[in-house]
Every structure is written in C-alpha cells, then in structure tokens.
Amino acid sequence: RPGGGAPVVSLTTFPFFHVAAFTSLYAVMAAGGTLVMMRKWDAARALELIREHKVTHYAGVPTTALQLLARARETGDGLESLVLLSTGGAAAPPAVTGELAEGYGERIAPRNGYGLTETCGGVLANVGAEYREHPGSVGRPSPATEVRIEAPGDDGVGELWLRGQSLFRGYWGNPEATRAAFAPGGWFRTGDLARVDAEGRVSIVDRLTDLVIRGGENVYCVEVEQVLQAHPDVLDAAVVGVPHPLLGEEVGAVVRLRAGSPAGAEGLRAHVAARLAAFKVPAHVLVRDEPLPRNGGGKVLKGELRELFAPLGPG
C-alpha cells in the first residue's frame, strides 16, 4: 500500500525478459520502494546484498529461493531484515514453506502465485498463513480476474481459463494463435490443468502438454515431482512421460541428490510408492549430479530430459 508500513527493499532475481520480474517491479514502484538487482544469481552474494541493503522482500524462482535458504542455514545467517520470500515462474515445492518454518518460524512470510506473459504477470496469490496451511495452492485470483475450470473430470481437474482486465489482446502478428487462445466470451485458455476448491483457491496440477497418460490413467507430473522433492536427500526433481508400446507412456523421473546421499533409484521409487498410487510411481529414475537444465525463467527444459530416456527405447 503506497505510503503505508515500513519501506520496501526488494531483491528481485528474475531476469527482465521474464514477466515474473514485472510482478515484483511494479509492486515495488507502487509502494515507493527500492529495487536491488543482481547481474547473475549467486546465493552467497545474495546474502551479502540482503545484509548490505537491509532487504525486506525476496523474489525469485523456487530453485534460487531454496538455494538462498540452504546457504543461510549453512552460514548461520538469520536473514534479520527479511519479512517476505516470494517465488514464481515455476511450481514451488513444499520444501519452500518447510524450510522457512523450520529456520524462521512465522517471521518471514512465504508467498507464491500464478501468472503468465499473457496476463501481464501475476494474477493469483497465496501469502502468509494461508500459504502455510495450503502449500499446494497458488491462491485466489485478484479482484479483477475471473477463474473458470473448463471440462473438469471426476477429480475436478480441467483446463484453467482466465478473464479480466490484465489479459493481453492477442499475439503480435499472429491472428491464428490469438483465435486459438481465446474461447467465446473473452476467456483465455491458459494450457494449464487446475482445480478450484470450495473457498476459491486454485491449485495448478500440470501443463496440458506435460500430462502423462499411462494405460488410460492420468498422471500429473507436478504431483509426483512434489513427492520426490519432499524427500530429504532430493535437491531437485522433474517428471516426464516415457514412451511405452502397450501403456502408451510410463512415468520417468530425473533427480538430483545431495552430495553423498545413499538414496538410489529404488529408494526414491519406494518413497513415491508409499505416498501415491502404484501407477504414479516412476518406472524409470535417472539420478544425476549436475543441476537440471532450466531456461532463463527457471523452468525445467523437459524436452532435454525426455532425450535422456531415449536410449531406453519404447518400453
């Protein structure tokens, strides 16, 4: 709120070619705050900047947020000035709220949300106590945003459609893509699968293109990824569909473990099996030492991960 509360000093680590950067940029401008930026992400340097500028708000993708918290834990940094840790640009694993609660109680509020380039940035938000209570949700829509779940299945999951004043008018020079993106009545087809609970909270389940259909059963990659990321030795994980001659697809997972972890592929499969239905358990688990490939906005490059499974052949 402009003119209200303590001055906002935000360390914004999103690249400025990603729309998530502007969600925090415009909010900081509206509050008359200060923006602290980094040319290149480095967790140790981020801690220095937070101390030097008394940063109150952090904004970045979940991967950098977790790296920041891990570095703070290793060095004993209390993050004394920080009051809000906001993530976006990719699905946030439950570890974000867990790490905050374990290290700082409720002093640092977690924030998550949802938005697209086509919505000019974030249009849903989940903050503070509500986020801690519902960590799998991206929150409720802004007052100027309408939400609709199109063609929901028995589990309430369908494509997320949005309508409101922040929506773009169309793709530049591409009328065919624009017509395909909008449904009658001005509804924008996001391409994301979601559900809405009775109180209006939206949970993103997966991308339509990431859905794995195994023998007629829908497997939402985000759900399996979150279970894997909840394993204490897992630093990062991503799930993709692997072709199978009879089932159509099987579930494949690429996982990065903490150094020296004894967990292996079978241990990770058992971890998932204890929490999800059998058809959702990854049939193939690849463990790697290096970080998962991501684009500049922090999203995992799943096309590259699918290529890792190509040597397995169909089935």
Image (cartoon, rainbow, N blue to C red):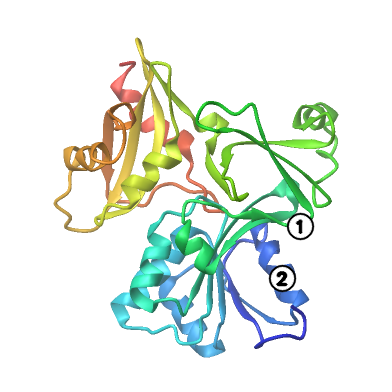
Q: Is residue 90 left or right of residue 241?
A: right
Q: Secondary structure at mark 1?
A: loop
Q: Is residue 305 left or right of residue 190?
A: left
Q: CA distance from mark 2 to mark 1?
A: 16 Å
Location of residue 1 in the rendering, given as x and y in whole percent from the top left corner: 74, 78
Q: Residue at x 41, y 33 (%)?
A: 240
Q: Camera-side residue: 187 or 134?
A: 134
Q: Residue at x 31, y 37 (%)?
A: 276
Farthest top residue in view: 246
Location of residue 289 in the rendering, given as x and y in whole percent from the top left corner: 27, 50
Q: Residue at x 56, y 88 (%)?
A: 53
Q: To which quarter of the image does residue 244 belong?
A: top left
User: In the rendered image, is residue 238 in sight?
Assistant: no
Question: In the rendered image, which residue does mark 1 sit on?
Answer: 143
Label 2 crowding class (10 Å Cα cut-off): few <14, some 14-19, many 20+? some
Amino acid, disc 1: Pro
Q: Can you say which quadrant of the picture contains the C terminus?
A: top left
For the image shown, how many numbered marks are present on the structure? 2
User: In the rendered image, is residue 231 in sight?
Assistant: yes
Q: To which quarter of the image does residue 248 belong?
A: top left
On screen, residue 47 above or below 125? below
Q: Is residue 168 left or right of residue 148?
A: right
Question: In the rendered image, which residue does mark 2 sit on?
Answer: 27
Q: To which quarter of the image does residue 184 belong?
A: top right
Farthest front residue in view: 198
Q: Secondary structure at mark 2?
A: helix
Q: Camera-side residue: 187 or 56?
A: 187
Location of residue 70 in the rendering, given as x and y in whole percent from the top left corner: 34, 70
Amino acid, disc 2: Ala
Label 1 crowding class (10 Å Cα cut-off): few <14, some 14-19, many 20+? few
